[in-house]
Amino acid sequence: MASPLDCVADLVVIGAQVVTMNAAQPRAEAFAVADGVVVRVGSDAEMASCRGPATVVYNAAGLTVLPGFVDAHAHPGDSGMEAGFVDLDGAHSMEAVVARATAWRAAHPDAKWVQGGPWDGIALASVAPLAALDAEFGTTPVFLWSEDGHSAWVNTAALRAGRLLTENVPRGGQVVRDASGGLTGVIREAAVDAVTAVMPVPTADAVDAGITSALLELRRYGITSVIEASSDLSLLAGWRRAERAGRLTARVFAAMPIDLGEGAPAVARVAKLARKYRSERLRVNAIKLFVDGVVEPKTALMLDPYIGGGTGPVQFEDAELDELFDSADAAKLQIHAHAIGDAAVRQVLDAESRLVARRGPADRRPILAHLEFVSPVDAPRFATLGAIADLQALWAYPDPYVTALTVPVVGEARANAAYPFAMLAKAGAPLAAGSDWSVTTLNPWPAIEVAVTRRDPDAPGEVLGVGQGLTLDQIVAAYTLGGAHAIFADTWLGQIAPGFKADFVVLDRDPWAIPTEELSDVKVKLTAVDGELFSRGFVDSGN
């Protein structure tokens, strides 16, 4: 006679190798879910009393199950919409770029701007695109973004729209000119913002299509929560429409960008949005600060000079950061800072230290993303301040971008010290991990492999920074426990444990049982959010 039900489950997962990320119960065979929450974890036999006539039973057939991944830094809304613009992937010449942009314009005759990207930062690094873009597109503004998102190609019409034809370059921006002072059509940092600020706002239909595409990709790669690292009003409205329609199959935590000079009033506007968007699937919880740029065009803020001189432009003065940190703290908003250079990292940590001195200690969890260079002196400060080291691990190998563009401006020795993951981990820094999609792929498994090996996942060769790799346990924890901690959700996300949301992924192989060089080949078979299963058609609801 069957035992009486002592838990009533909507879903039971059995026959699995469950890696729970719960230190009190690291491994299990099965778990039960009710109302989107895990209610029991244990053996197959222990789930029998949770199974009723309406219970869905998913037999994992020995596959590995992990908590759903938290991508702690990505741009899903924008990335999803990119499919509607000019695709420059693989266009390695100016002629190819113009040809693709021309074909896109012919297919979109009503478009007021020609938009697209990303252009090849290596093959096209020295190109001055202005003349070619003007010749082909005339008075139609053109905006083509770079691979790193910190530079763009524009024509004269776009420069005029952004008020960049004069010498009045916006603070923190660059309008690149040639040796004779002529415009090249290359703009960087705040100058990019000046142009994007006057570009047409995407239609609701375009946003909705982009979000639909982004959610598909998030499910495909087992990403159940994501920090949208620079959101905007149109994207928030789109996420909300998806939520109300029951289509928001991931949890979106939005950081809203604050531009140079905006100060406390901008933080107040974000605080208002945080009160409006605060559901379990859609939250505004942070302000985004671009504290520096990127290394290759020398816009990252460095402690030591670049080859040829200069340490990079200061974006925010310390007094401005103090105002923003105070305002965010008063509004209970998190800091999410883009910090590439070691001086930028120090500036953010210094600002947090001053905040603690002024307002006292608190559980603030400021996020510092990217961290290409970190001084050994500053590594222990992450733990002291509770600051999150948000790693984009796929960047930490010696790819052609490093060889062709990074080494020439910082030298080989300094380039080899980039992305000091092990140093941060040994210093006790709380780790999270993100993709920065669409700068690089949303798929976490190539990044996980690189975090461990520090080598090219497609053609393993030389190592970047010997000894700076993480263990598989450490980087998986960063994508689960660490990501949940980074979004203040570590009491309900990041583990497969009783009382935690039933966000989980089923993998096609056991990552701990394969060579590290095969980690990038791991595939997601099924993704679940709140116990709702999403797969490629193989869900087994009977047993």
Image (cartoon, helix red, strand yellow):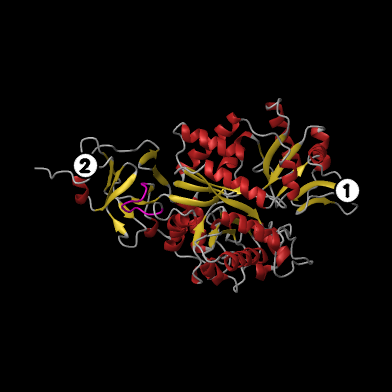
- For label 2, the residue is 51
Q: Residue at x 57, y 57 (%)?
A: 329
Q: Residue at x 72, y 58 (%)?
A: 315
Would residue 264 appear left or right of 141 to someone viewing this image?
Answer: left
In reply to whether residue 462 is colored magenta, the answer given is: no
Cα separation, mark 1 vs mark 2, equals 73 Å
Considering depth in this image, is 151 or 72 the residue closer to the camera?
72
Which numbered marker is on residue 419? none
Earlier-in-chain disc, 1 versus 2: 2
Q: Residue at x 40, y 56 (%)?
A: 511
Q: Label 2 neighbourhood size at 10 Å, few (<14), some (14-19), many (20+)? A: many
Q: Please state the horizontal and vertical placement of residue 114, each as a whole percent of the image.
A: 72, 34
Q: Residue at x 73, y 44 (%)?
A: 93
The quadrant of the rendering that contains the N terminus is top left
Give the residue type that dot 1 points to: Gly
Residue 330 seen in this snapshot: yes
Q: Which SS does the magenta portion mostly show?
A: loop
User: Element under label 1?
Assistant: loop
The boundaries of the magenta stretch are 494-502
Judge whether 50 appears above or below 213 on screen. below
Quarter occupied by residue 107: top right
Foreground label between 1 and 2: 2
Give the residue type that dot 2 points to: Arg
Quarter occupied by residue 456: bottom right
Q: Label 1 neighbourhood size at 10 Å, few (<14), some (14-19), many (20+)? A: few
Judge whether 353 appears above or below 448 on screen. below
Considering depth in this image, is 190 or 361 the residue closer to the camera?
361
User: Element under label 2?
Assistant: loop
Which numbered marker is on residue 182? 1
Would residue 99 appear left or right of 283 to someone viewing this image?
Answer: right
The quadrant of the rendering that contains the C terminus is top left
